[in-house]
Amino acid sequence: MGQQEQAPSGTDSKQPKDLDVGEYAESFGALKTSMSQGRDLRKRKADLKAYREQTEKDKATYEDEANILANYDQIVGEQHDLIASTQRELDVQTEHMDRLNADLAQAKGDLATTRSHDESALADLKRELDAKVKASESAYDQAKRASEQAKTRHEQAQGTSSESEMLEVLERADQQKAAAKDAFKSERDTAKRAYKKQKDAFDKAEKPLETKVGKLEDEVKQLSAAITKNRGTIAAAQQRVAYCEQVHDDPARVETLKAEIERREAQEQRMQADIDELADQRAEVKKSTGKAKGALVGLAVLVVVVVVAIVVVTTRGF
């Protein structure tokens, strides 16, 4: 009797385990399905978004073309008026641009001529000043040589009757050398100041011309931008007129586009319904993913605990 009572007990202990394994397998399967449905759902939503955007563009085109058919003469007339008024403004701007370019060319020429004259004058002045400095330097070099020669003769005359005379010669030579040195430095400094003064004067004289050129260049740049804008306005208006003529010559295209929009709107509804259905299915599937998510969380916690334990053991070991 005792053995008969133990057998059922062993059977009962295995059944919960088999049941748990099956439930977990089912939960993980549901999780996999839910993830796949999620990817599909995101793709379908993106497709629907792009589809709706194109539909909105088609609606805008339809509204524009329907308006063109209803108000063709007024719309085309407004575009022709815009072309005419902009062209008149453009003609004035073009004439002004011709005058500005001529003034700019003249101003640049005046500046170039002035600069050329000033550079030539500065070059002549530099040659003149350099010649004076060089002459002063040569005089200084000659005085230095004379001083060295007087020094040598004085040294040779020491202990002789001409020693006193040679000393006087040496002193005069040294004085002349010092004077020549001062004259050289003075001439060099004077040349630098003279060159700078003249260059500053030329720069000051050129400044108004440079300012004029810069101002004219700015005016040309601004006017060029305005001309470009008006040319773009004319081109756009001409394209608008051509488009209006195409629509006016083929009114059936408007009805065709309207039918296409209705077809697209119906397709959008079907796409939205499919998305809603898939979302409902996913919501039901997600209800069965609890055990799988719990197991994954538990596994993550276990990994963290193991890592922390390893770190603690390793730290204590050191």
Image (spheres, helix red, strand yellow):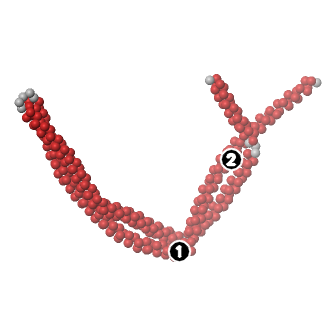
Quarter placement of the C terminus: top right
Q: Quadrant of residue 198?
A: bottom left
Q: Which mark is residue 276?
A: none
**Element under disc 1:** helix
Q: Secondary structure at mark 2?
A: helix
- Three-letter amino acid code of the residue under disc 2: Gln
Q: Residue 253 in the image: x percent, y percent?
A: 56, 68
Kindly identify which numbered label has been placed on residue 37: 2
Residue 107 appears left or right of 55: left
Relative height, residue 142 to residue 44 (above, below): above
Residue designated by label 1: 72
Q: In this view of the protein, which residue sits in the foreground, 4 or 220? A: 220
Check the image and report above or below for 245 versus 131. below
Residue at 41 percent across and 72 percent down: it is 89
Q: Looking at the image, is 134 positioned above or below residue 96?
A: above
Residue 286 in the image: state x and y as whole percent.
73, 45
240 on left or right of 295: left
